[in-house]
Structures are given as C-alpha cells and as structure tokens.
Image (spheres, rainbow, N blue to C red):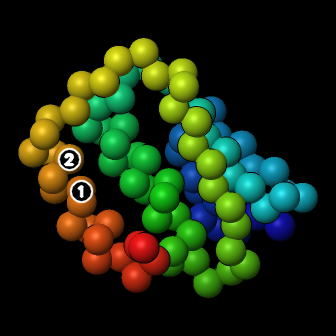
Amino acid sequence: MKSPQVTAFLKAFTHAHYHSKERLLTWRPRGTFDDALADEVIAMIELDETSENVPFHRYTDLSLLTDIRLKIGHVFSLSPDRRESPFAR
C-alpha cells in the first residue's frame, strides 16, 4: 500500500514510479540539473524520513540528465539541512 507521501510524490514528480511489491520508489528526472531539480532530489531523499508508515526504498537515476547548471551557493545551502537530518550518515 502506498503511503500518502508516496502518492503525493507520484502526483508531483513526472517519471516517478512506485513498485509496491519491492516497496521501491524510482525516479528518473530528465533535462537540466539546476537548483530547482536539486531541491526536488532533496525532497525525494527526505520523503520517508518524516513518514510514520512502513519505510520504503528510494532510487533516483540521473543518467537521463542532459546538462548541469547549479549555483554553488545553492549547493552549500542544501548541505546543512542534510547534515542535520537524523537519518544522515
């Protein structure tokens, strides 16, 4: 069964699929990897960290990206949030 978080993610993100038997959420973004897409990737990573339901596996395939256009300041702004996550290793 899909959690509400997974259902919301599938509606919001194109090229995302949930494989219920494996409890696996896959996402294959396409196009340019920019600040907005970086935020979406972080949202994908953090998706189940706040879920109260059964955990699931996540996989993001970045092989269909065609360009990278990240602002270095944005990258640095993302890292403290991940470092402070209770699930970061």
| Outermost residue, left side | 73
Q: What x and y, as percent, mark residue 76?
A: 15, 53
Q: Is residue 2 visible?
A: yes
Q: Residue at x 59, y 65 (%)?
A: 5
SS class of the residue under badge 2? helix
**Quarter containing the C terminus:** bottom left
Q: Quadrant of residue 73?
A: top left
Asked if 11 appears above or below 31 in the picture, the reply is below
Q: What x and y, as percent, mark residue 12?
A: 53, 45
- Amino acid at pointer 2: Val
Q: Residue at x 34, y 42 (%)?
A: 38
**Residue 56 in the figure: left or right of residue 68:** right
SS class of the residue under badge 1? helix
Dots 1, 2 in contact, CB < 8 A: yes
Q: Gap between marks 1 and 2, in whole Å? A: 5 Å
| Outermost residue, right side | 21
Which of the pair 51/62 is nearer the observer?
Answer: 62
Q: Which mark is residue 15?
A: none
- Amino acid at pointer 1: Leu
Q: Quadrant of residue 17?
A: top right
Q: Which mark is residue 75?
A: 2
Within 10 Å of disc 2 (Cα), the crowding (few <14, some 14-19, many 20+) is few
State the residue position of label 1.
78
Q: Residue at x 68, y 61 (%)?
A: 57
Asked if 67 appears above or below 17 in the picture, the reply is above
Q: Is residue 10 visible?
A: no
